[in-house]
C-alpha cells in the first residue's frame, strides 16, 4: 500500500472510531447499532462506483429466510428488489453480505457463520464478512477459532495448520478495536491492540491470512470491490 493510501484510509479508520464513540451517547442498543451501521453504509456508498447496488435487508436462500443483514452488495446486473428502502433478495443475486457489530461476541460469529453457510449453499461465490467496531471477547480467543494462535515465545500471532477453523463460512473479519489486551510471559506483562484483519480469499487451502497493521478500512473496501467485480 502506498503512503498516500495509508494516510487516506488511516483517516477513515479514525473517522469510524470517532463516530462509534459518538454513538455511545445513545443508551438504546438498537439505536446505537443502527447509527454505526448507517454510518458505515454511507462510507461504502461514497467510496464506490456502484452506490445503487449497496443495500440493507433480508436474504433468502433455498426459499428460506437466511436473516436480516446490515450490508448487502447486489451482483452487477441483478434486478433491484428494493421496497421501502430495504431489499428482500435471493442469495444467488448477492455479491457480498456483511454483518456489522458494535461489540462482537462469540455468539455473533457463530450465528453469522451458520447464516453464511445457508447462503453459500445457494451461492458458493458469495463473500461473507464481518466488520467489528469492538471485540467483546479476547483477540487471542477469536483468532484461535480461525486457526491463528498466539506464540508466547515470539509474542506474535501465527497461522497454526493444526488448529480447526470454527467459522469456515466467514471469508473475512475487520476489527478496528484499539483497546489493549495483555499476556504474561515469565511473570512479565506484554500488550497488543485488539485490532486486526483476516481473510481467506487469497488462500487456496482455506486458511486465513492475518494483517495486524492498519489501516483496515482499505482492506474492508477492497474486499467489497473484489466481490462486486468478481
Image (cartoon, rainbow, N blue to C red):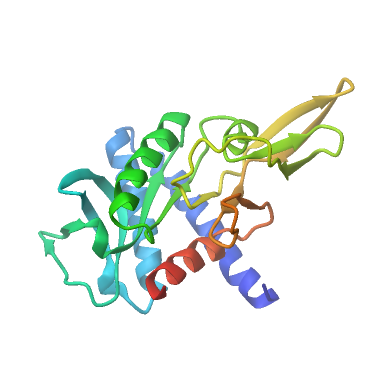
Vertical order, 6 against 171 (above or below):
below
Number of numbered discs visible in the structure rendering: 0
The quarter holding residue 225 reads bottom left
The x and y percentages for residue 120 are: 34, 52
The x and y percentages for residue 49 are: 37, 79
Q: Residue at x 50, y 58 (%)?
A: 15
The x and y percentages for residue 167 are: 48, 39
Vertical order, 126 against 179 (above or below):
below
The x and y percentages for residue 2 are: 68, 76
Nearest to the observer: residue 31 or residue 216 = 216
Screen quadrant of the N terminus: bottom right
Screen quadrant of the C terminus: bottom left
Nearest to the observer: residue 135 or residue 19 = 135
Nearest to the observer: residue 158 or residue 39 = 158
Give the left or right position of residue 75, taking residue 188 as reference. Answer: left
Q: Residue at x 61, y 30 (%)?
A: 141
Give the left or right position of residue 50, taking residue 178 as reference. Answer: left
Q: Residue furthest right?
A: 186
Q: Residue at x 62, y 36 (%)?
A: 139
Vertical order, 164 against 45 (above or below):
above
Give the left or right position of residue 10, taking residue 91 as reference. Answer: right
Q: Residue furthest left?
A: 83
Q: Residue at x 64, y 35 (%)?
A: 163
Amino acid at each position: 500500500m502506498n503512503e498516500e493510501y495509508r494516510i487516506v484510509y488511516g483517516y477513515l479508520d479514525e473517522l469510524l472510531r470517532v463516530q462509534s464513540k459518538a454513538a455511545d451517547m445513545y443508551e438504546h442498543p438498537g439505536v446505537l447499532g443502527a447509527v454505526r451501521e448507517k454510518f458505515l453504509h454511507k462510507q461504502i456508498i461514497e467510496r464506490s462506483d456502484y452506490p445503487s447496488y449497496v443495500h440493507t435487508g433480508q436474504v433468502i436462500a433455498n426459499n428460506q429466510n437466511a436473516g436480516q443483514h446490515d450490508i448487502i452488495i447486489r451482483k452487477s446486473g441483478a434486478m433491484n428488489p428494493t421496497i421501502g428502502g430495504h431489499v428482500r433478495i435471493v442469495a444467488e443475486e448477492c455479491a457480498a453480505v456483511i454483518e456489522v457489530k458494535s461489540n462482537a461476541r462469540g455468539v455473533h460469529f457463530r450465528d453469522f457463520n451458520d447464516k453464511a453457510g445457508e447462503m453459500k449453499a445457494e451461492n458458493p461465490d458469495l463473500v461473507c464478512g464481518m466488520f467489528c467496531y469492538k471485540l467483546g471477547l479476547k483477540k487471542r480467543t477469536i483468532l484461535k477459532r480461525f486457526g491463528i494462535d498466539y506464540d508466547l515465545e515470539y509474542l506474535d500471532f501465527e497461522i497454526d495448520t493444526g488448529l480447526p477453523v470454527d467459522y469456515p463460512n466467514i471469508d473475512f473479519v475487520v476489527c478496528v478495536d484499539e483497546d489493549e489486551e495483555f499476556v504474561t510471559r515469565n511473570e512479565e506483562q506484554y500488550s497488543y491492540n485488539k485490532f486486526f484483519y483476516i481473510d481467506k480469499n487469497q488462500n487456496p487451502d482455506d486458511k486465513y491470512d492475518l494483517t495486524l497493521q492498519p489501516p483496515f478500512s482499505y482492506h474492508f473496501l477492497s474486499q467489497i470491490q473484489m466481490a462486486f467485480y468478481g
